[in-house]
Amino acid sequence: MILSNVEIHRALDDKRLIIDPEPAPRFPASGVDCPYNTTSVDLRLGGELLIPKEERPFNIDLGVAPFSGLLSPDNYETRPLRHGDKYTLERGRFVLGKTLELVELPIREDGSCLAARIEGRSSYARCGLLVHFTAPTIHAGFKGTITLEITNLGSAGIALGAGVPICQLIIEEVKGVPFVNVSQFHGQTTPGGR
């Protein structure tokens, strides 16, 4: 079951969902955008991008893990995005970003666990911007910033800026208490999963 904005507030208050910093304001106010849609909450682009180095092509072997090692300074350039900075994502290009917010979905013994999905925003999608491909799931027990696989499929460059509401988090209830199975990206604070 997907949580409504009212239930997202309740989950934040009960610490079943932790978003730091917590999106605000919680309710629509004159002249201020409310990040809580009816069944999601908007998250913002964080202050760091990983940009593939064009002059250093490399091959990826899907049979060899962990993949976070591929995202090394040898293959990717780290680009800080400070408030007010813009990075133009050209047509057909791909970068990794991260959410400004750290998200935590604690596994709770009382069975009130949550999981989530990250999705793009329809207004940006209409410009050709994708913020993830096939990996929208944020598992119960996850803690960290969320990596965004950002691609421009549109016909014009798209300016990316830190703090822009770039994606939405959809929260779902988990039936039962899952056993802990920590992923290679648990605790990440960079787009590369470190």
Image: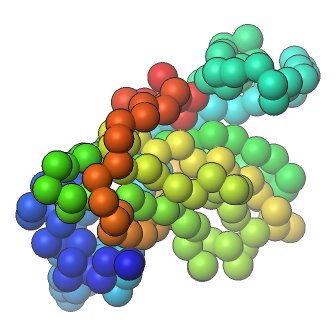
At x 34% / y 86%, what residue is drawn?
A: 38
Residue 143 placement (x, y as % from top left)? 33, 39
Foreground pick, 14 / 19: 14
At x 67% / y 73%, what residue is drawn?
A: 125
Kindly give the residue lying farthest to the top in the view shown: 74
Kindly give the residue lying farthest to the left in the view shown: 13
Left or right: where 182 falls relative to 75: left
At x 76% / y 45%, what residue is drawn?
A: 94
Which of the 4 image quadrants contains residue 133?
A: bottom right
Residue 49 placement (x, y as % from top left)? 58, 36
Foreground pick, 191 / 156: 191
Which of the 4 image quadrants contains residue 24?
A: bottom left
Check the image and tell me how it is coloured.
rainbow
Vertical side of 17 occupied by 171: above or below: below
Foreground pick, 114 / 130: 114
Foreground pick, 79 / 10: 10
Asked if residue 83 can be seen in this view, the reply is: no
Residue 135 placement (x, y as % from top left)? 63, 52
Vertical side of 106 occupied by 156: above or below: below
